[in-house]
Image (cartoon, rainbow, N blue to C red):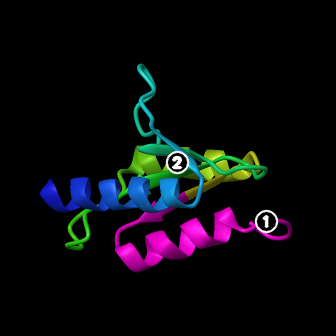
Amino acid sequence: MAGEKQLQQFIVKKSRERGILVYKFASPGHRGVPDLICIPPGRPAYFIEVKNPNGKGRLSGLQELTIEKINRQGTKAYVIDNKERALEIIRLNAQTGGGG
């Protein structure tokens, strides 16, 4: 899906501008794992599942379960389907000190 790919490229570009390492994440043998792993300097890593901004992208049951498991482990996993939400999450996780 072109929209999803473009949004993913936007997330990678804006994250890297803030000094966040971003990797396309593939987990062979483990379907449902989020698309990106993001590692900000001096902050915990987090995952991003990118969905099509046209509103048609939905999490599969396996993706929902995987994201819940990640969050229960104390690691953040976000679902992003628009640029505004992407920028919000990037800003939140690029901040130094405090919250996350």
Does 32 appear above or below 91?
above
Is residue 79 toward the left or the right of residue 3 in the image?
A: right
Q: Disc 2 marks which residue?
A: 65
- Kindly check if marks 2 and 1 are in contact, taking CB atoms under 8 A apart as contact: no
Is residue 34 toward the left or the right of residue 50 in the image?
A: right
Foreground of the two, 94 or 17: 17
Does 75 appear above or below 87?
above
Mark 2 → mark 1, Cα distance in angstroms? 30 Å
- At horizontal 59% and vertical 51% (from top left) the residue drawn is 20
Q: Is mark 2 on a helix, strand or loop?
A: helix
- At horizontal 60% and vertical 72% (from top left) the residue drawn is 91
Amino acid, disc 2: Leu
**Outermost residue toward the bottom in this view:** 84
Between circles 2 and 1, the one closer to the viewer is 1
Q: Where is residue 60 in the image (x, y as percent from the top left)?
A: 35, 51
Does 39 appear above or below 87?
above
**Outermost residue toward the left in this view:** 2
Q: Which stretch did the figure color magenta?
A: 78-100
Foreground of the two, 24 or 42: 42
Q: What element carries label 1?
A: loop
Q: Disc 1 marks which residue?
A: 96
- At horizontal 45% and vertical 26% (from top left) the residue drawn is 27
